[in-house]
Structure formats: C-alpha cells, structure tokens
Amino acid sequence: MRMWCPTWVLRRPVVCSDTRFHDPLGLGKPQERTLPSTSVAATLRGRAMRAKVALIASAIALAALGCLAASLVASGAPVTAADVTTAGEPPATITQATTQSTSVTQTSATTVITPGPGQPSVILPDKKRTPGALNPKVRQFTIKKTICKSGWTKRIRPPVSYTNALKIKQMVLYEETDSPSEYEEDHFIPLELGGAPKNPKNLWPEPHAQSKLSDLLETQLKGKVCKGSMKLAKARATIRLFKNTQG
C-alpha cells in the first residue's frame, strides 16, 4: 500500500511513506511498517542541493575562463599585416636613388671623403695620430695677454724648417703620395685658439684647398673669443668638430 502527498516545490505528488506487510512476531497476521515521510523529503533536498552546487561550480569555472581570456587579449600587442612574414621569404630591400653620391674611403691611416662630381676630395685628420694638443699658457683668463694680443701668435709659430720636415714624415704615416708642396703642415687646434705650437699631435699635413676654409673659420672664432661673445672652450670645440668632419 502506497500513500502520496503533494509537495509545494515540485508541484506533483511525492511518496510520503512506504507501507509494507511483514510478520515480525510470526503471528501470521500482516503488520504495517511505515517509513517516515521526513526521510523522503531529506533525500529530495540533498539532491536539489547537489544540483545547485554543481551549477554554481560551473558558473565559477566559466567566469574564470572568461577573465583569463580577457587578460590575454588585453596584454597582447595588436598584430598587423606588416608583422606577419613568411618563413624563408627574404626581406624587401628599398633602394632610393640620389642625384649626387658621396663615398668614404678609409685606409689604415687616412680617411678620404669623395663628394660628387666636380668637387674636391676631403682628407680628414687621423684622430689617433692627430688628436690635438693645447698650449698650457693659454687659458680663458689669459687671452688678453696671449691670443688676443697683437703679434703673439707670430712669435710662437714654429719655423718652416721644423714644419716642413714634420710634414714629410707625417705624409708617409697618412699615406699621402702627392707632392709635399700641395700640403700645409696645419695646426689641428690653431695657435689663435691656444693650440700647441710644436707638438706633433697637434700638427698634420692638410691640403691647401682645405686649409683655406679652416683658416677663415679660425679667424672668425678668435674674433668672437676676444670680443667676449664666445668662450674659449666653445671655440676650440667648434674648430675641432669642423676639422674632424670637413678637414
């Protein structure tokens, strides 16, 4: 015999008790054993709870996966078509034509800049052989008594016999094969800006075509230093840069 009772959760009849016939005393008279309805309700509640826990766990797992995917997308750099290259495909080379080319030829001792057609070659001083040297008597506070004093550089200029002999030696080091008459033994830091007069590290064989340009700049820089519109150190740095790049 089964009894049914309604439940407000499932809205359908549920077995509230289970009545079975048995004879525990051996009297031959069937007796009824009734299971309490609370055990059935507890079973249903347990099943519902397990289903709810499983649903919550699934939702948490999906949310975690969504957050991980979002973080990967946010941290990654955008990929463009230019970033994608085919394996084994050589990179493209862009060649730009110019109307006038300049070549730089460097030997063990000499750097020669060859401009475009119709322009003379430029020989640069060797930074190791001709780094430049200063006259210790010339300072910013002594310029009025030295470089800015009329006739001072003429008195300290080395004799031609000394510079000509040094020019022959240095032309061999600079691998210059032209006639020595086409070169001038030039002061890298000019005497007008406090360069050392006889130090070989401040002298080098410079073509006359180049020395004409640098001589003009040296005179202009000395005028600014003596007028007070330029510091001596800045003037020296200017002429050093000019000769290292333009001879």
Image (tube, rainbow, N blue to C red):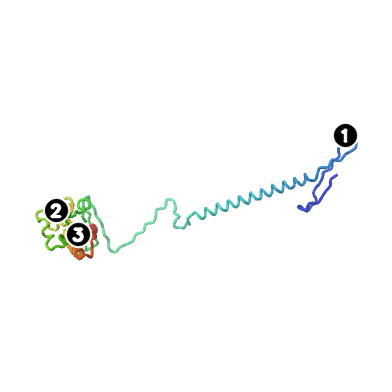
Going from N to C along the chain, the mark reached first, 1 or 3, is: 1
The C terminus sits in image quarter: bottom left
How far apart are labels 1 and 2 at the CA level? 138 Å
120 lies above or below 69: below
Q: Which of 191 and 87 is in front in this view?
A: 191
In which image quadrant can residue 211 be found?
Answer: bottom left
| Mark 2 and mark 3 residues within 8 Å of each other at the beta carbon | no
Residue 114 can be seen in this image: no
Residue assigned mark 3: 141
Residue at horizontal 86 percent and vertical 35 percent from the top: 24
Rendered image: mark on residue 139: none
Mark 2 is surrounded, within 10 Å at the Cα level, by few (under 14), some (14 to 19) or many (20 or more) other residues, namely some
How far apart are labels 1 and 3 at the CA level? 133 Å
How far apart are labels 2 and 3 at the CA level? 23 Å
Rendered image: mark on residue 25: 1
| Mark 1 and mark 3 residues within 8 Å of each other at the beta carbon | no
| Mark 1 and mark 2 residues within 8 Å of each other at the beta carbon | no
Residue assigned mark 2: 198
Going from N to C along the chain, the mark reached first, 2 or 3, is: 3
Q: Nearer the viewer, residue 173 or 74?
A: 74
Residue at horizontal 14 percent and vertical 53 percent from the top: 198
- Amino acid at pointer 2: Lys
Mark 1 is surrounded, within 10 Å at the Cα level, by few (under 14), some (14 to 19) or many (20 or more) other residues, namely few
- Residue 119's spot in the image, x, y percent? 21, 63
- Amino acid at pointer 3: Phe
The N terminus sits in image quarter: top right
- Residue 159's spot in the image, x, y percent? 9, 56
Q: Dot 3: what SS?
A: helix
Residue at horizontal 63 percent and vertical 51 percent from the top: 59
Residue 185 can be seen in this image: yes
Residue at horizontal 73 percent and vertical 47 percent from the top: 45
